[in-house]
């Protein structure tokens, strides 16, 4: 669709269409990185209730890396435990088992958070406000056009995209249209994405046969697992209980096709919250559940499982979130996949816009996130099949047994928690020396560990020292530098890394602080009672806070296991963590040249 | 001094004179309890720099109980480690040892926080603002008068105090005086307290011979312990290093009398920050320290060690904080003692004002806090002597050895951390059945323990379930109620506690929520995988969140040690925690009648 030829009303570096979780995550990351960003949304205000509500452990880590997790954890409900119910021989259901809701052993936050989407969006909106960014709404895009001029497309400083916008609440007689020129556009405009459709990007995949109803309310019940995530296989249909903030509970209820489908289409008029509550009462029998309180939100849907055929046009216009993947909401992946899409994209856009990286870096967005979305659909198919299938009973030996279901639940734990996300080898993920840290995986996120700050013995979660601040983190596992042989190695490392042509200096612009692009942290083997932070070579400490020791904290409970848990030997290692918290490369201390090569593939020399 | 006989301009329940830590702690507690409070201060604005800055572990717990610790911890510096330096045989100083800064094993926060007083006050000011309370300043009290009418003094609803106030910034020609009638007055107006002097309350104690200088700045140094608390005994005088927020450091420097005293009085004109920095350079030799940055604050002082002869007049006018005790700042007790004074007082005032308790309850304020202040002075004398004394060296065998100093540092750990505060037996602290929980001490604060919520397996710090919300907490350590004998006992307990004449019902006003005065929590023996919160008798769960289990959390690291660490056997116990977090009574499950008796001594029957 061609944009109007009317005058250009404004220019912006990044125009984001859609202020849902994907759009807001991107906007927040860009705004805090100092990138000029504008966010438009066609809804007059943010979501008030219902919709997506589950935040996975990895997403909590990501939000923590932006300083946003504290409020999320305070406001949200935490799901630590899952309970499994099956049909009882006595009729009704009985509890078969309880198991941790999260089965990713390295998860820093071993729980999921549930909180309604509006509250989650509010966290982003408040954070954006501190940077002067407000969502512009209600505004609808009406046309988008990408320049076909090769030169313009190659120039990262050009504005090759024109978007026509229409203000939906303009006073009669006032101009309600506007044309924006943008360097980059993000379509984060949901499952029915206008951006995707307008660009002609197809969705690959299909609709399932499973039909579900959802209802959010505060029940009164003697069901002992009402505050746990429950997977209930009953002969009256499957049901999932998701406790929410306060005393609210979300119930997912499997519906029979005959009750909801008219002429092959889901017919919302055939169902009502009352009918959903009647299904819930049946499913939970012999437990009693009543619904004396207001229904906060409800809906019905058929699960669709689709992935967009591409995530970008010329790495100038991107789509993210529900615009590029739709799947079952029951594993709580939707909002998480969406936010992690743009967490992956935002720092790359920032680096290109700053001139630190070549625009080719942006190709890794689709490479990394589309594969993830495909894996997500594959998982979702299997999980939905197990969950929506009939339970195994004496009469139905072909049904799904609890053991099958629990095994799937736990096998997929790394995936559903988001902890297991693993980006394949690319320019950003160099596996050459991966074996130097036997328990770290290049392409996966840097796992949490408590370390102790050498200067003041204060314990820190290492992840908190790797914030999403657009910088690469260079972790020097320096070993025990009071030991002479190791000290010599570390001194050699300092010399090597201090060369003008080494990556530390080569990519740091003249006049910029020496930690502008690379934040160097040392993690020593030693004891907090004897280590002196002043013994670490000066190049590795831009500040006294940058020297850490792998020791237990004062109370003796946490810490002291970083080398062991990462599988790093006492002769040390270099670990490069990408700005998004994923491991980019691991190398021995004497292979700085390979790290130079890694960055040569990504960064543009400052001189 | 008689108040003016002019018309009464206003009435208030509690008038607080002085908006330092003691006054603000009181105001915040009262305001959040819904008590009408007014705070006046003669300073035109809050403290900007310097002054008291150390927050002890117990004070952090107390602030946490008001929901204020999170910001304090975020903004402040944490001191985890102490380093000890002595004269080196090679000249200058050398490190003898490092040891944990806090030596109270049960401290929930095993560190001290340093943050300038203005930032701490800001936390209270923001919290007060949420309740519509602003500090009224600059206002000076000019007269105070307490009624001598016995009837009026006995009536908790009377306003027997008249205070004349003078507004210091009134426009010329405008009325700048006002008379306030108050039910209660708190003098939290510092070491030179106008309230104390006007009431003729004397200070007992004396001035020491120790003279110290203090300077706050950001040094540049190769001293490896610049971010730890350091006790430095050098032949050039003793010095204490206290790291502060950001890169700031506070140095306490012992001064020679000849350098600062003129005609027997400290003469600030004889000293300067430059002179203090020169002393610091000498004391830290052979380490280098320079002071290229601005001096944030500095002062000199002679340590005075005094306690007010009484803390109240007729339990209508109270003094708190520096107004009733002055001592060495080096052990960082000042602000802590002040805030804990009014933490002790505020809930008692609230209970009396609400009509829950007789005014006699207020006598326990002086009883508990004056004894503490006396203990503080005794400790301070010993600590100052050791710290200001000459170090033991080859030449000076009479000096203080490191072993002596470290032993004192650790022996006093319970005291300096605030964790060891122990209120003597009184109407509020009943030790009859103390042996039922062998590791709990009636009169000490309820120690922290991680417990798991039965309904959702979420771990909680038990202290966080005991907020300073003016309610007594009734902790029912119910044992294993799946075991039949124990279940029978707990059912008997429910029956006993449910009697109309039992404490639960007797003191709860008609129409008030059943948890208005007593918040009941059950802590069961069991496993999170099998416990059902619905199995606990209904009387003990006003909400699903009130049932806890003494089990490890999902990760298996914390929790599961409450019974063991409190010394409670599996047959259970009742623990009554006062609204300020201190243990009021412990009893076996079958001695509810003794708990009834305990509350009879404190509370007034609602009917």
Image (cartoon, coloured by chain):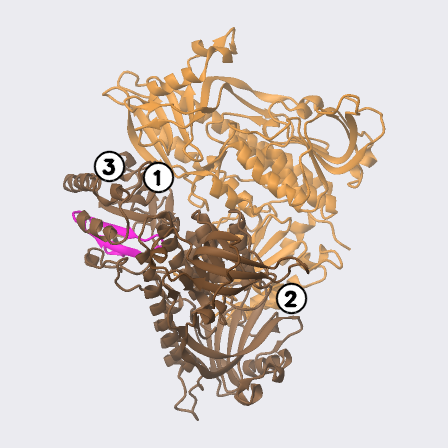
Chain colours: A brown, B orange
Label pair 1/2, CB-CB below 8 angstroms = no
Name the residue: 62% across, 68% down: B538
For the point 58% across and 34% down, the residue is B21
Q: Position of residue A183 (x, y in %)?
A: 42, 55
Which residue in the structure is indicated by mark 3? A537
Total number of numbered discs in the rendering:
3
Q: Residue A589 versus residue B19: which sits nearer the camera?
A: A589
Q: Identify the chain of the residue marked 2, using the numbered disc in the image.
A: B
Query: In this figure, which residue is indicated by the disc labeled 1?
Result: A545
Q: Nearer the viewer, residue B476 or B283?
A: B283
Q: Which residues are magenta?
A: A565-591
Disc 1 element: helix
Q: Residues within 10 Å of mark 1 (few under 14, many from 20)?
A: some
Q: Secondary structure at mark 2?
A: helix
Disc 3: which chain?
Answer: A
Residue B394 showing in the rendered view: yes
Q: Is residue A219 magenta?
A: no
Compute the Cα span from label 3 to label 1: 14 Å
User: In the rendered view, would you say B282 is above or below B509?
Assistant: above
Q: Which residue is mark 2?
A: B495
Secondary element at image label 3: loop
Please tell me whether residue A583 belongs to the stretch shown in magenta. Answer: yes
Percent of width and height locating residue B583: 56, 47
**For residue B115, above or below residue A554:** above
């Amino acid at each position: 669709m061609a944009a109007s030829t009317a005058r250009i009303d404004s220019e912006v570096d990044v125009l984001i269409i859609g202020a849902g979780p994907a759009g807001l995550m991107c906007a927040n990351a860009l705004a805090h990185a100092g990138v000029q960003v504008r966010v438009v949304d066609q809804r007059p205000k943010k979501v008030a209730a219902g919709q997506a509500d589950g935040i996975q452990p990895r997403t909590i880590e990501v939000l923590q890396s932006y300083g946003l997790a504290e409020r999320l954890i305070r406001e949200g409900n935490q799901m630590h435990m899952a309970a499994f119910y099956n049909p009882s021989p006595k009729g009704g259901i009985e509890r078969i088992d309880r198991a941790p809701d999260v089965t990713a052993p390295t998860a820093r936050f071993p729980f999921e958070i549930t909180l309604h989407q509006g509250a989650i969006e509010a966290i982003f909106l408040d954070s954006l406000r501190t940077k002067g960014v407000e969502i512009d709404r209600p505004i609808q895009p009406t046309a988008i056009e990408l320049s076909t001029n090769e030169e313009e497309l190659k120039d990262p400083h050009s504005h090759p995209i024109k978007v026509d916008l229409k203000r939906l609440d303009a006073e009669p007689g006032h101009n309600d249209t506007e044309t924006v020129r943008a360097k980059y556009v993000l379509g984060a405009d949901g499952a029915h994405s206008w951006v995707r459709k307008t660009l002609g990007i197809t969705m690959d995949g299909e609709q399932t046969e499973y039909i579900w109803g959802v209802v959010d309310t505060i029940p009164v019940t003697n069901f002992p697992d009402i505050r746990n995530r429950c997977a209930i296989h009953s002969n009256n249909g499957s049901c999932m209980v998701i406790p929410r903030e306060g005393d609210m509970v979300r119930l997912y209820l499997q519906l029979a096709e005959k009750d909801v489908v008219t002429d092959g289409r889901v017919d919302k008029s055939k169902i009502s919250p009352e009918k959903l509550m009647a299904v819930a009462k049946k499913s939970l029998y012999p437990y009693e559940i009543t619904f004396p309180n207001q229904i906060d939100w409800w809906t019905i849907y058929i699960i669709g499982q689709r992935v967009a055929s591409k995530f970008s046009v010329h790495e100038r216009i991107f789509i993210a979130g529900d615009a590029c993947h739709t799947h079952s909401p029951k594993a709580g992946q939707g909002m998480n996949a969406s936010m992690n899409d743009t967490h992956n994209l935002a720092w790359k856009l920032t680096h290109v816009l700053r001139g630190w990286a070549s625009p080719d870096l942006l190709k890794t967005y689709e490479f990394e996130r589309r594969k993830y979305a495909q894996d997500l659909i594959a998982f979702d198919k299997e999980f939905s099949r197990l969950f929506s299938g009939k339970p195994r009973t004496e009469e139905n030996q072909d049904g799904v047994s609890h053991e099958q279901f629990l095994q799937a639940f736990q096998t997929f734990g790394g995936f559903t928690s988001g902890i297991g996300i693993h980006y394949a080898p690319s320019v950003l993920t160099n596996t050459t020396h991966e074996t130097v840290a036997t328990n770290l995986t290049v392409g996966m996120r840097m796992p949490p560990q408590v370390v102790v700050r050498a200067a003041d013995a204060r314990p820190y979660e290492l992840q908190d020292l790797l914030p999403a601040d657009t910088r690469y983190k260079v972790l020097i596992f320096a070993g025990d530098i009071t030991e002479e042989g190791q000290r010599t190695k570390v001194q050699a490392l300092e010399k090597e890394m201090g060369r003008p042509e080494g990556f530390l200096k080569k990519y740091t612009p003249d006049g910029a602080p020496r930690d502008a692009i690379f934040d160097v942290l040392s993690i020593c083997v030693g004891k907090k009672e004897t280590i002196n932070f002043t013994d670490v070579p000066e190049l590795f400490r831009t500040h006294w806070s940058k020297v850490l020791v792998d020791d237990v904290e004062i109370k003796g409970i946490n810490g002291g296991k970083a080398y062991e848990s990462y599988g790093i030997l006492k002769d040390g290692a270099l670990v490069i963590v990408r700005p998004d918290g994923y491991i980019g490369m691991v190398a021995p201390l004497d292979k700085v040249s390979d790290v130079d090569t890694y960055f040569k593939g990504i960064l543009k020399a400052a001189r």
